Amino acid sequence: MFDGVHLFFRWLHVIAGITWIGHLYFFNFVNLPLQGSLDDAGKKAVNPQLMPRALFWFRWGAMITFLAGLVLFTMIYMYAPGVGFGPTANWGEGGMSVRAWWILMGMLFGTIMWFNVWFIIWPAQKKILGGKVTGDELAATRKTAAGASRINTFLSGPMLLGMLGAQHAGNASGLIHAIVFIAIAMFAVKFAYGLSTTDLPKAIE
């Protein structure tokens, strides 16, 4: 029974995470350049059809990923069948394990990203889509949402490394390892931003 529940929440965490991060990358690497090429008339035609649908999957993907992750963390690190709640062997005996170190790093970044979605990006987008802000306030609100989304995009690389590192990093638990991996992940995101601003159709020809 425990293993079945564990498998279900792991599946839910992964599929919701794909939905969330997939939309995050869509917004930053596809939609952002598109919005820059549209005039006000184009935005009024496209965004009312596109943004509510995309933001629905985006924010609820984030919420389900976050909640399923908390359940998984409890099941793996803070609960043992037949024993009850409390630190398990996965957490470590006599100190924090390498596995726990990596997952906590991933959870830290993931929690910041979840907070940004629900308490910065989504409230700002509701104001924009609802026509509640205009002029300079509209520009400032768009900048706030875009800034939080950009932060999340850069954090997504280290977050995913933390999640994967819990299972596959072995003894690579030192601060230097973490700094190197985080730098590589953020460089990859920056490279993707640069690629997104190129004329890809012409580049592919």
Image (spheres, helix red, strand yellow):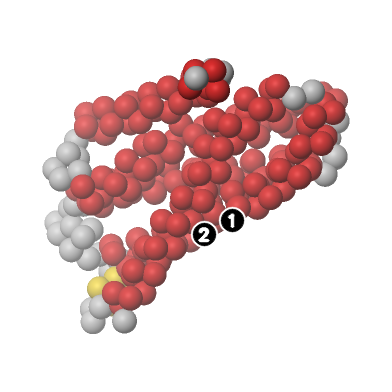
**Which is more toward the observer, 29 or 97?**
29
Quadrant of the image occupied by residue 61: bottom right
User: Which amino acid type is shown beneath numbered disc 1?
Assistant: Trp
Horizontal side of 78 relative to 137 (left or right) equals left
Residue sitting at 19 percent across and 35 percent down? 174
Tell me where residue 200 appears, x and y as whole percent.
53, 22
Q: Is residue 141 above or below residue 91?
A: above
**Which is more toward the observer, 120 or 22?**
22
Horizontal side of 120 relative to 72 (left or right) equals right
Q: Which residue is mark 2?
A: 64
Quadrant of the image occupied by residue 161: top left
Tell me where residue 167 appears, x and y as whole percent.
23, 51
Res. 179 in view: no
Residue sitting at 20 percent across and 43 percent down? 169
Query: Pointers 1 and 2 in contact (CB under 8 A)?
Result: yes
Quadrant of the image occupied by residue 145: top right
Q: Is residue 187 above or below residue 2?
A: above
Circle 2 — which element? Answer: helix
Horizontal side of 36 relative to 177 (left or right) equals right
Tell me where residue 102 appears, x and y as whole percent.
27, 46
Q: Residues within 10 Å of mark 2 (few under 14, many from 20)?
A: many
Q: Which residue is mark 1?
A: 60
Q: Is residue 149 above or below residue 78?
A: above
